[in-house]
Image: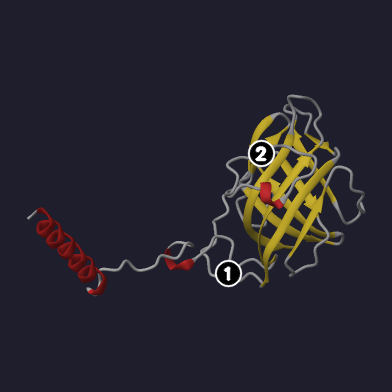
C-alpha cells in the first residue's frame, strides 16, 4: 500500500512539472543585464547623465569653464559682495571688452555712474563663438587682452582703479550681429559665461566674478 501511494505521488509530481514547462506564458522573459531598454551608462544610446552646475564659485588662480555656476554674474570685489546689474560687450579699437557693472543703466548704452565695475578685454573675433582661458601665470598681449576693476572710494576721492594679476575662463556661445532698431549704437547680441579672478590683495579682499550673460554688443 505504501509503495502504491509513493508511486502515485511521484507520477503526479512529474505530470505537474511537464504541465508547467509546456504552458505558454509561464516562462519568465530573459532580462538584459543592462537594465531597461538595454541602455548601459556611458555607451551609445544610453540617456546622458546631466552635468550639475556648481552651486557656488571658489576663487582660483586658474579658472575653468566647468567651475562657472549658472545664473547672473556675482562675486566679491574689494572685499564686498558684488552683483552685476549691467553686462554688455563694447567694440573698441583694441578688441571687444566685456563690461560688468554694479549699477543698472537708464538706457542699454548709457553710462553707469558711481559704480563698482569690472572690464575684460579679450582676443575673440567679432561674431564668432570661441573660448578663452588664462591663468595667473600666462603671459598675454596687454593691448588686446587685459582685466581690471574699480570701485568708489567715497567722498570727493572718485573711483579707484585696480590692475592686479588676473585669470579668466570665458566662453562665447552665441554672437549675433544685428543693428539695433531704436539705438544705432547697438550692433548685436552676445551670450556666454565667464569667471574672472584677481590676485588677492589681502585675506579679506578676494576678487572674483562668475556667472552667465546674455547681453548687447555695442559701439560708442
Q: Quadrant of the C terminus?
A: bottom right
- Spatial CA distance of label 2 from label 1 is 39 Å
Within 10 angstroms of label 2, few (less than 14), some, or many (20 or more) residues? many
Residue at image location 12% in from the left, 62% down from the top: 8
Q: Residue 4: image x %, image y %?
A: 10, 60
For the residue pair 55 and 79, the one nearer the viewer reads as: 55
Q: Which mark is residue 15?
A: none
Q: Which mark is residue 75?
A: 2
For the rendered model, the colour scheme is secondary structure
Q: Is residue 163 left or right of residue 192?
A: right
Q: Is residue 172 above or below residue 55?
A: below
Q: Is residue 62 above or below residue 31?
A: above
Q: Quadrant of residue 166?
A: top right
Q: Tell me, yes or no, whether the two marked residues, 2 and 1, touch with CB atoms within 8 Å.
A: no
Extreme-top residue of the structure: 203
Q: Residue 47: image x %, image y %?
A: 51, 64
For the residue pair 6 and 195, the one nearer the viewer reads as: 6
Residue at numbered disc 1: 44
Amino acid at each position: 500500500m505504501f509503495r502504491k501511494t509513493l508511486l502515485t505521488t511521484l507520477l503526479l509530481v512529474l505530470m505537474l512539472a511537464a504541465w508547467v514547462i509546456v504552458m505558454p506564458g509561464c516562462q519568465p522573459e530573459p532580462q538584459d543585464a543592462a537594465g531597461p531598454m538595454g541602455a548601459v551608462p556611458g555607451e551609445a544610446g544610453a540617456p546622458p547623465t546631466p552635468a550639475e552646475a556648481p552651486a557656488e564659485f571658489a576663487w582660483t588662480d586658474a579658472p575653468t569653464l566647468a567651475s562657472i555656476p549658472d545664473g547672473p554674474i556675482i562675486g566679491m570685489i574689494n572685499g564686498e559682495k558684488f552683483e552685476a546689474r549691467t553686462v554688455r560687450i563694447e567694440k573698441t579699437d583694441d578688441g571687444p571688452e566685456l563690461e560688468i557693472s554694479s549699477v543698472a543703466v537708464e538706457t542699454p548704452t548709457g553710462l553707469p555712474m558711481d559704480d563698482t565695475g569690472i572690464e575684460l578685454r579679450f582676443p575673440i573675433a567679432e561674431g564668432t563663438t570661441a573660448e578663452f582661458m588664462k591663468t595667473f601665470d600666462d603671459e598675454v598681449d596687454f593691448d588686446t587682452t587685459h582685466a581690471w576693476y574699480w570701485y568708489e572710494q567715497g567722498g570727493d576721492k572718485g573711483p579707484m582703479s585696480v590692475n592686479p594679476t588676473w585669470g579668466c575662463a570665458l566662453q562665447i556661445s552665441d554672437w549675433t550681429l544685428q543693428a539695433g532698431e531704436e539705438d544705432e549704437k547697438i550692433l548685436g547680441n552676445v551670450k556666454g559665461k565667464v569667471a574672472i579672478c584677481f590676485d588677492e590683495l589681502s585675506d579679506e579682499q578676494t576678487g572674483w566674478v562668475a556667472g552667465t550673460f546674455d547681453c548687447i554688443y555695442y559701439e560708442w
